[in-house]
Image (cartoon, coloured by chain):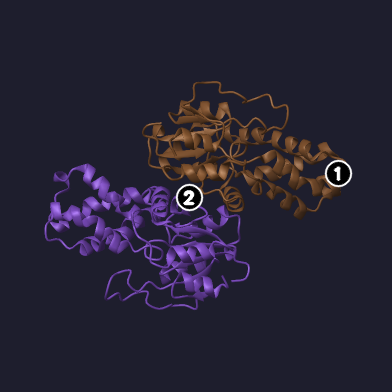
Chain colours: A purple, B brown
Amino acid sequence: MDGVRALVFDVFGTVVDWRSGVAREAAPFLARHAPGADPHAFADAWRRRYQPAMEEIRGGRRPFTRLDVLHRENLEAVLPDFGMDAARVPAGELDALNLAWHRLDSWPDAVAGLARLRVRYIIAPLSNGNIILMTNMAKRAGLPWDAILGAEVARAYKPSPEAYLRTAEVLAMQPGEVCLVAAHNGDLAAARRCGLRTAFVPRPREHGPGQDRDLEPEQDWDLVADDFNALAARLGL
Amino acid sequence: MDGVRALVFDVFGTVVDWRSGVAREAAPFLARHAPGADPHAFADAWRRRYQPAMEEIRGGRRPFTRLDVLHRENLEAVLPDFGMDAARVPAGELDALNLAWHRLDSWPDAVAGLARLRVRYIIAPLSNGNIILMTNMAKRAGLPWDAILGAEVARAYKPSPEAYLRTAEVLAMQPGEVCLVAAHNGDLAAARRCGLRTAFVPRPREHGPGQDRDLEPEQDWDLVADDFNALAARLGL
């Protein structure tokens, strides 16, 4: 990790537990509109529409559109799967539920680990989440970012190379001076192809019990650590 | 200030004392290359090239270029005024001096005032300074921003309307939910024309002793306060 000056972080899954948070926020909504629906299944279904929505933008078929807008569209699209009719749910309730993604709790080690890492490195999200989403999340959860970077600043969604390369450019750093911290092998692989350094922090409960992906490093990442405190310790912080 | 949810701040002059900071950073450089030159006069001369450089971009004659690049060009341009030849000064020394703008001290009330304001509002710079400049400055001075916004995020320099309007858009707020805090009447006037709320905090020593501009509010700004602590107190914080 010689020469690294900034640590940039995947957020959904790596820093915060999106599945539990969305399920918690959706539960009262579902109790009103779809009694008996499983909030975790709802969170999973909503999230399954995340990559396909961004793929339209990565593929150039749609101009850059921030994630809050994609989340809102995906929310309407997922309602019928749970027996709801978007036209019969007040728009204000959908707008409010859409902010569930702004109110996610961090993994227990995240705030303390980031505070340690921040002593030596510039730390920032490199998330597909948009700026106000990341800002509200950080303010609520106490995440001590130095700046809010990511897709909306780069105007490109990971794993498009521009998302990583423009982030390094904004930091006025060479790609090799920036390290991506992520719980997802695919994100790290894309960052490595752009010349960034890579740190893998597995989050084996991101997808709940029975998770079968991203349990182990799939390449020889520059660092592998069990959580952010272990990452700080590995870096001598 | 009813309905205001974010406070965005002009930075050079309003949050930090650029003149003293640049003079301090330039002093050893001048001692080597232009003995006898006045560091404050050097800071003033460098800063005088700031608005004309941005005007090329505001006028559409040059694509958006971040302030670090403009500062570096302006630095080379100002050297002859102090008897120096840019070709005879090592580029590495100019690169290092250019980072003077990343190492400015805040006014004595700024950190404490921002910490109070941050309890209720999202706080962020809306500066013409670029993201890494603002990030390095905040880290060094302890400015507790929630996000780094400004010209590089908006891809437009103040006082162009896009700088204010795109900042509100990124915040997912109406312009009237955002208040600009600035020591400069012109900046506030431009923000008001875009529908933002306005708070004037005079900084009567920004330009040193004998300052003759921006000593008083020139319009009925929504708030006027002597410093950031007084601003927090006016807002009941």
Instruction: Identify which amino acid the numbered label 2 is placed on.
Output: Val
Label 1 secondary element? loop
Q: CA distance from mark 1 to mark 2?
A: 40 Å
Residue B92, image x and y in percent?
75, 55
Residue B124, image x and y in percent?
49, 44
Q: How many marks?
A: 2
Dot 1 alpha-carbon crowd within 10 angstroms: few under 14, some 14 to 19, many 20 or more: some
Q: Which residue is nearer to you in this view: B213 or B97?
A: B213
Identify whether A102 is placed above or below B237.
below
Residue A66, image x and y in percent?
38, 49
Left or right of residue B89, residue B130 in this image? left
Pointer 1 residue: B34
Q: Which residue is nearer to you in this view: B197 or A55?
A: B197
Q: Which residue is nearer to you in this view: A121 or B221?
A: B221
Residue B163, image x and y in percent?
50, 36
Q: Residue placed at 37% from the left, 77% from the top? A: A215
Q: Residue furthest top?
A: B219
Subunit that carries the residue with mark 1? B
Q: Which mark is residue A153?
A: 2
Instruction: Identify which amino acid the numbered label 1 is placed on.
Output: Ala
Q: Is residue A46 visible?
A: no
Q: Residue placed at 40% from the left, 69% from the top? A: A184
Q: Which residue is nearer to you in this view: B121 or B229?
A: B229
Left or right of residue A46, residue A32 in this image? left
Left or right of residue B192, residue B53 in this image? right
User: Would you identify the image quadrant in which residue B209 lies?
Assistant: top right
Q: Quadrant of the C terminus of chain B?
A: top left
Specify whether disc 1 shares its chain with disc 2: no
Dot 2 alpha-carbon crowd within 10 angstroms: few under 14, some 14 to 19, many 20 or more: many
